[in-house]
Image (cartoon, rainbow, N blue to C red):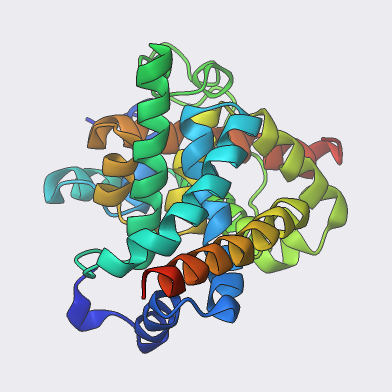
Amino acid sequence: MLMCRDLAEIASDYIDGELSDRQNLSVKMHLMMCKDCRTFIGNLRASSELMRAHFSGKADDEFIRRIDERVPEALNTRKTKGNDSD
Amino acid sequence: MDTAVRPESETSMIEDLKRGDATAYHRAVRDYSPGMLAVARFYLDHSSAEEIVQDCWVTVIDAIQKFEGRSGLKTWLHRIVANRCKNRLRTANREVAMDFSEILEPELANRFNSTGRWDLPPKLQFHDSADTLMENGALSDCLDKHLSALPETQRSALILYEAHQQKSDDVCNILDVSASNLRVLLHRARQKIFLMVETFQETGEC
């Protein structure tokens, strides 16, 4: 029988739909009977969504700016080389 | 990604990049650099990782001409970064250290009794949606702090999988880890964030 600790070990696999049908069924049956694990799964899922929201649009502006400066230079060098070889 | 299902915006961006359009590069640099940096940070320290990503963009200007679209643009860029990082590690004769031995975070593992039942179950439900939680500036700062404290391997896996929504197969390929080890990295990282949010909700402290 699946215990709470076993479920905690495979909780991310359950959330991401990575479990086999059989494992998935035992998790679902356990969750029907165990309120604590339902809370745990719900909170782990919320943590994952939180990170997704947190990461979206995150960029280090200074780092991006440095690349933005280098790329046009490299583009110009390439164009110049292309013209030379014509 | 199959070329047949490539979004139109990506197809036109690839064409613009092949033409050397500076605006397209500006957009691509902004969109793809954070993910590329996450890949590089899996392998290298921060400044080497930034250097590799910058160099990669210069390489891309030529390499994009040969891009045939067998994978998505993002996956292609991530692979270039990963290969460069692996080469650098090979030259330096170093390897990425990873620990896959424990699936549960010790702090969570200690909350179960010897029969495998919860001794200290989660008390609160994270009711709020992610967006509402993110409006809490203090929580957002706390999340930043904890994400920076994650081992690079876990953070890179998390960023690629959660933020950039790359498929598991692609993440495994790019980070050179097995599917089961990727699952461990992701699960360990999520548990840490779960524990952090729980403490924050219970005590208001980071």
Q: Position of residue B87 (x, y in %)?
A: 36, 28
Name the side, left or right, on which B117 lies relative to B199.
Answer: left
The residue located at (31%, 56%) in the rendering is B167
| In this picture, residue B70 sits left or right of residue B161 | left
- Measured as percent of width and height from the top left, residue B111 is found at 55, 21
Q: Position of residue A77 (x, y in %)?
A: 54, 63
- Determine the residue positioned at 81% across, 46% down: B141
Residue at the image point whose x is 42% and y is 51% from the top: B161
In front of the other: A25 or A75: A75
Using residue B97 as the reference point, say whether residue B53 is left or right of it. Answer: right
Q: Where residue B32 sits in the image (x, y, percent)?
A: 52, 61
B196 and B1: which is toward the camera? B1
Query: Residue B16 or B77: which is nearer the viewer?
Result: B16
Residue B1 visible in the current orientation:
yes
Residue B152 vs B165, above or below: the answer is above
Vertical order, B188 against A78 (above or below): above
Rendered image quadrant of residue A30: top left
